[in-house]
């Protein structure tokens, strides 16, 4: 099964594909992260994608191996440069695409030693600091002494702050080492978490449709009081690499389903619907951003050309007959923590709860600067939060978490965010 090659032919796409700079590239000012500009209107009909070749690369007379044969991997080419130095290429599923160069590979050797691996991307820069694992489940950041940025960027946030590429030093043995852009939360790992929570008697999970590649999409329903008529809609992972948003969402849901007096009182009046993995195909295939239709799902909440967004739309339309939706959140990741609410000039008093929520979180977590970028444009509902508000009347937000935000802080932020929205909704 081993294939001895120097550069996978698919990696030649580096020279054949072009990638324009996205209008979503972050801006930086002295006052902190300013967030993305206005989302452009883009078509969401299917576009061709480059589905990566899966296999094993063998080098040095079949003593050193690289592999992308696992869910969540992305590795498009490997070359041996001599003297235990390797170059790997990572290309996107299609273009144009924003700067989210996901990579994931395993490496091992029959002769234990240190090797150097240089990451190279398709018209991108090295956004994600590498994570390392010996079992593919538990990850930690690579020790900084083993990370060498190449052509470092400037500033704190955004594309310009990221190095052009990076060289990693990896101690390889006969047991595989995983190197990934972020922790691996594939569809099977997410489902394990959902199944573990669903052991509680007031939680169930059930299918709401199929993804483009026919993976089952599920919703988790938290419903302790069958008479409750107020509901929340929580989604995550429209974009596969945006793991930090998922980590906060996970903590958010765990807090609501917890044993505190606040959570118990909240569940008596509110039902929560959660789709934790909106893009299972992209997550399992190691996509930079898009689904298997080659589309950014968070631009398809108006035309609904993709099955993943249609599944949630149809679910909400059905549930809207029985529930009053009072809050919606879509968890994402970007260069730093930032909130994207809908301005009260568009929502009026109904949307004020979102800003009260942000203020309360900020008061409890003052160690992290509060970055807010509100939008008053609700004419176009391409993004989830605007669709939630315009068509289902729920105050809603896109909640972004920083790629490199401390994982312990992310969990605390998810807990605090859940506690503060529960308090506010119980007061109403």
Image (spheres, helix red, strand yellow):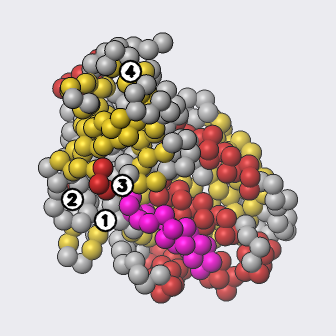
> Which x, y percent locates residue 249?
57, 61
- Marks 2 and 4, how far apart at CA: 37 Å
- Marks 2 and 3, how far apart at CA: 20 Å
Image height of 186 relative to 353, above or below: above
What secondary structure predominates along the stretch shown in magenta?
Answer: helix
Q: What residue sits 27% from the left and 38% below the top?
A: 116
> Which x, y percent locates residue 149?
21, 50
Residue range highlighted in magenta: 399-420
Of marks 3 and 1, the one in the foreground: 3
Image height of 32 relative to 22, above or below: below
| Residue density around tag 4, few if under 14, some if 14–19, many if 20 or more, within 10 Å | few
> Residue under circle 2?
161
Image height of 193 relative to 200, above or below: above
> Residue under circle 4?
63
> Which x, y percent locates residue 418?
61, 73
> Residue under circle 3?
143
Quarter placement of the C terminus: bottom right
Disc with the residue nearer the chain's start (2 vs 3)? 3
> Residue under circle 1?
35
- Marks 4 and 1, how far apart at CA: 46 Å
Disc with the residue nearer the chain's start (1 vs 2)? 1
């Amino acid at each position: 099964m081993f294939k001895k090659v120097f550069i996978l032919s698919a990696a030649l796409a580096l020279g054949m594909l072009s990638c324009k700079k996205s209008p979503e590239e972050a801006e930086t000012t002295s006052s902190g992260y300013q967030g993305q500009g206005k989302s452009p209107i883009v078509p969401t009909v299917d576009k061709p994608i480059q589905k990566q070749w899966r296999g094993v690369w063998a080098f040095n007379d079949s003593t050193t191996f690289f592999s992308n044969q696992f869910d969540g991997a992305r590795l498009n080419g490997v070359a041996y440069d001599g003297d235990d130095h390797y170059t790997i290429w990572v290309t996107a599923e299609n273009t144009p695409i924003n700067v989210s160069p996901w990579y994931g590979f395993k490496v091992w050797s029959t002769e234990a030693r240190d090797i150097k691996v240089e990451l190279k991307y398709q018209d991108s820069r090295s956004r994600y600091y590498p994570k390392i694992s010996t079992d593919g489940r538990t990850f930690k950041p690579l020790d900084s002494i083993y990370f060498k940025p190449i052509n470092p960027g400037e500033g704190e946030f955004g594309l310009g702050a990221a190095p052009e590429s990076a060289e990693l030093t990896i101690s390889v043995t006969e047991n595989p080492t995983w190197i990934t852009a972020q922790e691996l939360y594939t569809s099977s790992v997410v489902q394990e978490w959902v199944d573990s929570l669903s052991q509680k008697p007031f939680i169930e999970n059930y299918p709401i449709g199929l993804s483009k590649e026919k993976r089952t999409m599920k919703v988790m329903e938290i419903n302790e009081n069958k008479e409750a008529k107020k509901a929340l809609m929580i989604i995550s992972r429209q974009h596969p690499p945006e793991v930090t948003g998922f980590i906060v969402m996970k903590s958010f849901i765990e807090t609501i389903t917890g044993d505190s007096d606040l959570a118990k009182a909240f569940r008596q009046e509110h039902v929560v619907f959660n789709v934790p993995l909106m893009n299972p195909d992209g997550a399992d295939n190691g996509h930079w951003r898009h689904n298997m239709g080659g589309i950014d799902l968070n631009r398809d909440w108006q035309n609904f050309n993709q099955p993943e967004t249609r599944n949630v739309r149809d679910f909400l339309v059905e549930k809207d007959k029985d529930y009053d939706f009072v809050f919606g959140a879509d968890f994402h990741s970007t260069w730093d923590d930032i909130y994207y609410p809908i301005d009260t000039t568009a929502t009026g008093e109904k949307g004020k709860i979102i800003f009260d929520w942000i203020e309360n979180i900020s008061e409890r977590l003052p160690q992290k600067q509060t970055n807010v970028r509100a939008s008053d444009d609700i004419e176009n509902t391409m993004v989830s939060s605007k669709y939630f508000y315009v068509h289902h009347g729920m105050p809603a937000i896109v909640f972004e978490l920083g790629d490199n935000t401390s994982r312990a802080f992310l969990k605390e932020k998810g807990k605090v965010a859940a506690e503060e929205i529960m308090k506010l909704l119980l007061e109403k």
